[in-house]
Amino acid sequence: MKNSLKEKFLSPSKQTYQESFGKIISSFCILIIIALVVSILGFVTTKGIDTFTQSKINVFDFLFGNVWSPSSTGANGKPEVGAAPMIVTSFTVTLISAAIATPFAIACAIFMTFIANNRGSRLLRSTIELLVGIPSVIYGYIGLTLVVPLVRSIYGGTGFGILAGAIVLFVMILPTVTSLTVDSIKSVPDYYIKASYGLGATRWQTIYKVVLKISLPGILTAVIFGMTRAFGEALAVQMVIGNSITMPTNLTTPASTLTSQLTTGIGNTIMGTLQNNALWSLALVLLFMSLFFNILIKIIGKRGAAKYES
Amino acid sequence: MNPKSVNRIATTVINSLVGVVVALLVLLISYILVTGLPHMSLDFLLSPSQSYQAGGGIRDQLFNSIYLVILTLIISFPIALGAGIYLAEYAPKNWIVDVIRTLIEVLSSLPSVVVGLFAYLVFVIKFQVGFSIISGAVALTIFNLPLLTRNIEDSIKSVPDFQMQGALALGLSKWTTIIKIIFPSAIPGIITGIILSSGRIFGEAAALIYTSGQSAPVLNYANWNPFSPDSFLNPMRPAETLAVHIWKVNSEGITPDANAISSGASAVLILVIILFNFFAHWIGKKLYKKFTVGEVK
């Protein structure tokens, strides 16, 4: 009797077992996610560098070369896999759409937090939330039936091109940028605003000199988030950009982004060939850019936090 | 110019920018609905698609989309739940957990094409599963996991701390407390998150083109055996979803009435997503009332 009591007290209780069970299960789930991320990074990287290790393509030729035609050999006796036209197009589309979206997003955010009454801001907010949910193919379809003909009628040509892509992307990233900007403007402490009004500043002076200055890191983060989305967006862009792999010379001739080339190309090439590996290298560039944007957001977040803590 | 008139001008500029945005939104939604609704007949919803002639419907694509959402949730929910519980309750505050959080953020910001290509490489090619619903569901799981995990973590964290303290004081283990007490109170938030993420999955196309494929084989809706190749429940068959269908008829299709099909299908897609949105908010409020004293935050 005495022994069994001692054993009972010295051995782990039922609760301890439950506890370790729960810990193991939940850690296992998080391990699955980590394994997924690591294997995505690993697989895409190994596939992507095949172009450079197996086919001995120079990385600089790949990044800065102007001619993309993996099935034919160029002047230096190697296949031509210059990805510069697509990289340039991707960046141009992203930057233009972010440049158009930012003022609109900031205006909407200011309107929601300072100008509109409760109902107006709630209405605008729920519409914008709804827009976040609209699938990208629908944006692409609207771009195809509305934006492309519009560009065609104004600038001539086919209408397909960077301009059409940037307009579609602008509408796509607007909700993301707006809702993140609202969050950052709302996080400005109320006493700054009250102090500014108390000093006799007008509403615009308060917004411009106090609110926007304090929320600048947050707004930058919002814009970069939008750019991440624009850079990685595939189908909507692919439908309106025209998909011709040439160095873009103006905004209204067909071009091709990294993502659009990936979506159209992967199905038409054979696994393991250079044509296919070159596409994986494009995917690797996309991956790197996505990581780069992430790091940028982290840095801005840290510096922004440090600036206003002291 | 004195500050007052600058203030007036700035307000006008802001208001007109907002006006442009609102006009854009109204134009967008009404364009889809006005051009799409006339094509949205029962016949359109219930007849199979056609590749070469006009008059095709979207029956199989619509079913595939719904089936894919269900399969994806079945795979991703348990993992996201476990991960969310870990991050909310068990994760210590150290650099390893910081790295884990960063990895999840990276996953959520990866372009969906890259996620789709990864699933294509691993499942379709390496494991030789082929273009199939299950490959698509895995791709969408990867795409959905970070967002759902984040949502579950936030919902669990928003449960007041005294619930946990009370349960621990009664001698329950932490795990039992989480499952029996914390999780039920977090359900409203979690359900809202699930419905919103279903909307996202429903409209996703880029990750599916090379995983669940671009063909919709003829389905037999009377065959309930999931292992038979023409059964509608078979997860190993290729399945073109609604979103992929819209993309395909517009960019590669040779269907003569591509415009009619895509406007009809877009309207269906939008309506489903609007419905999901409303449903998510409604059920969130309803469940919150049921589980608490009834005050809505």
Image (tube, coloured by chain):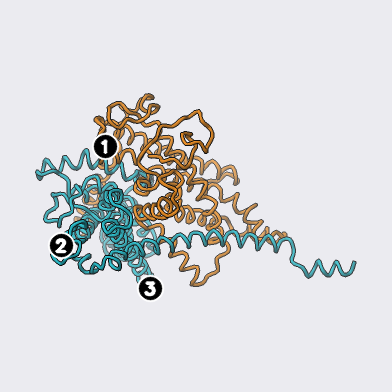
Chain colours: A cyan, B orange
- For this rendering, which residue is in front, B13 or B195? B195
Residue drawn at x 19%, y 55% as measured from the top left: B5
Q: Position of residue A11 (x, y in %)?
A: 77, 68
Chain of the residue displaying label 1 = B
Under mark 2, the amino acid is: Gly
Residue ID for mark 1: B253
Mark 2 Cα-neighbour bin, 10 Å: few <14, some 14–19, many ≥20: some
Residue B15 picture location, percent across and down: 25, 48
Q: Is the residue under label 2 in contact with that under label 3 (CB below 8 Å)? A: no
**Looking at the image, residue A124 lies above or below residue B216:** below
Choose the circle earlier in sequence order: 3 or 2. Answer: 2
Q: Secondary structure at mark 1?
A: loop
Counting from the top left corner in percent of width and height, residue B293 is at 60, 45
Q: Which quadrant holds the N terminus of chain A? A: bottom right
Mark 2 — residue? A74
- Element marked by disc 2: loop
Q: Which is closer to the viewer, label 3 or label 2?
A: 2
Residue at the extreme left of the image, as rendered: A156
